[in-house]
Amino acid sequence: MKHINAAGPLVKVEAVAEWGDPVHIEMSQERFRDLQLIKDEAVFVIPKDVKVFANHEA
């Protein structure tokens, strides 16, 4: 995990996949406290609500 923003009702986490692509994660404050995540820690992620934004060039 590269960056954690715990301000507000949702915690926003920026991570990097094994292959180098960015992964943006949002979770509740309660879930964040339960997981006890820290910056630069390696984690496994199982997506539940995936949104993919493709960069299409014309």
Image (tube, grey):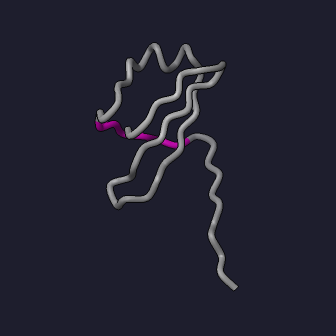
Left or right placement of residue 17 versus residue 40 in this view: right
Q: Residue furthest bottom?
A: 58
**The C terminus, quarter of image:** bottom right
- What's drawn in magenta, residue-wise? 42-47
Q: Residue at x 32, y 55 (%)?
A: 18
Q: Is 46 a magenta residue?
A: yes
**The N terminus, quarter of image:** top left
Q: Residue at x 52, y 19 (%)?
A: 31
Instruction: Locate residue 9, reporting x and y percent.
Output: 66, 19
In the foreground, 2 or 52: 2
Asked if 1 appears above or below 29 in the picture, the reply is below
Q: Residue at x 55, y 32 (%)?
A: 12
In the foreground, 37 or 44: 37
Instruction: Locate residue 23, reporting x and y percent.
Output: 49, 48
Instruction: Locate residue 4, reporting x and y percent.
Output: 46, 30
Residue 39, quarter of picture: top left
Number of numbered discs present? Answer: 0
Asked if 8 appears above or below 13 in the picture, the reply is above
Instruction: Locate residue 16, reporting x and y percent.
Output: 39, 49
Q: Residue at x 61, y 48 (%)?
A: 50
Residue 45, quarter of picture: top left
In the foreground, 35 or 10: 10
